Image (tube, helix red, strand yellow):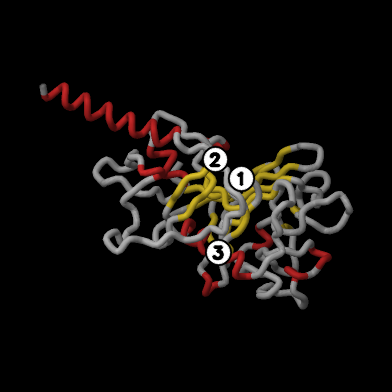
Amino acid sequence: MFSFIMKAAILLILVGCISFCISSEPLNESEITFEREERSLADPAGRQKRQSGLSCPKRISHSPEYPRDCYDILQSCSGQSPPSGQYYIQPDGGNLIKVYCDMETDEGGWTVFQRRIDGTINFYRSWSYYQTGFGNLNTEFWLGNDNIHYLTSQGDYELRVELNNTLGNHYYAKYNKFRIGDSFSEYLLVLGAYSGTAGDSLAYHNTMRFSTYDNDNDVYSINCASHSSYGRGAWWYKSCLLSNLNGQYYDYSGAPSIYWSYLPGDNDQIPFAEMKLRNRSI
């Protein structure tokens, strides 16, 4: 009888895990403003439910809770590969947010925080927009500097940048350490060692603070974020740039746009860019 009960309990856990993993198909939503969900006073940790209310605990000794990032979700269903798509997460110290998880690239577990794909979303925005996030998780978006800060403050994180040129050739840049500071540091960028095929166009910006057209933190005599010669858009400018993935979208006119200096071929003709982070425990 005891053996039967144990087998039934294990089966229920597996079914819950499977249900959680297959319930995450991307949602069809319009413009997303990344509104923050209030925590219940009875639940100050805000972690009593997981995605869609289904149970797939990442720690057997703990009650079900929201994952901290996409790597947590990947780990929560051992032996399976959860699909890429939208999930709810709650970083330590942060609020409950919806994110897009890449569960396929480089062993999966990536939390995507930026994507450029078709120019439908305006990226020439103010400090407050970049602070909280904007866009559409199904197309183009910026997850928000506050959210990125909370995510990268949870442990050791790495960064991966995906880039396509107009010929459809794919390149990537990977950094074995990635963190941004809080709003008081003006989201200062911290990077580790580079590897990849796209060339290292971000190390130049290491230790720089984030700049927008209405908050100039670069070390140049002009505001790089508002100057048309540098593609505009918010970034960790220095004096001024070797990269800017938040610049104006490439429109075939030859005007300065999304830029990655050491990309093979045309370094300013980039129709696709994506930035994502992952816990280095993998």
State the residue in front, 30 or 222.
30
Tag of residue 138: 1
Q: To which quarter of the image does residue 168 belong?
A: top right
Indicate which disc, 2 or 1, sits on the residue closer to the N terminus. Answer: 2
Residue type at mark 3 is Thr
Disc 2 secondary structure class: loop
> Crowding near pointer 2: few (<14 within 10 Å), some, many (20+)?
some
Image coordinates for residue 160, horizontal then vertical, percent: 60, 47
Tag of residue 132: 3
The residue under the point 26% across, 46% down is 62
Indicate which disc, 3 or 2, sits on the residue closer to the N terminus. Answer: 2
**Disc 3 and disc 2: Cα gap in Å?**
21 Å
**Disc 2 and disc 1: Cα gap in Å?**
7 Å
Image coordinates for residue 183, horizontal then vertical, percent: 53, 71
Residue type at mark 1 is Asn
Quarter of the N terminus within the rendering: top left
Disc 3 secondary structure class: helix
Disc 1 secondary structure class: loop
State the residue in front, 81 or 55.
55
Indicate which disc, 1 or 3, sits on the residue closer to the N terminus. Answer: 3
The residue under the point 43% across, 59% down is 37
Reading the image, the residue beneath label 2 is 26
Residue type at mark 2 is Pro
Tag of residue 2: none
The residue under the point 51% across, 68% down is 182
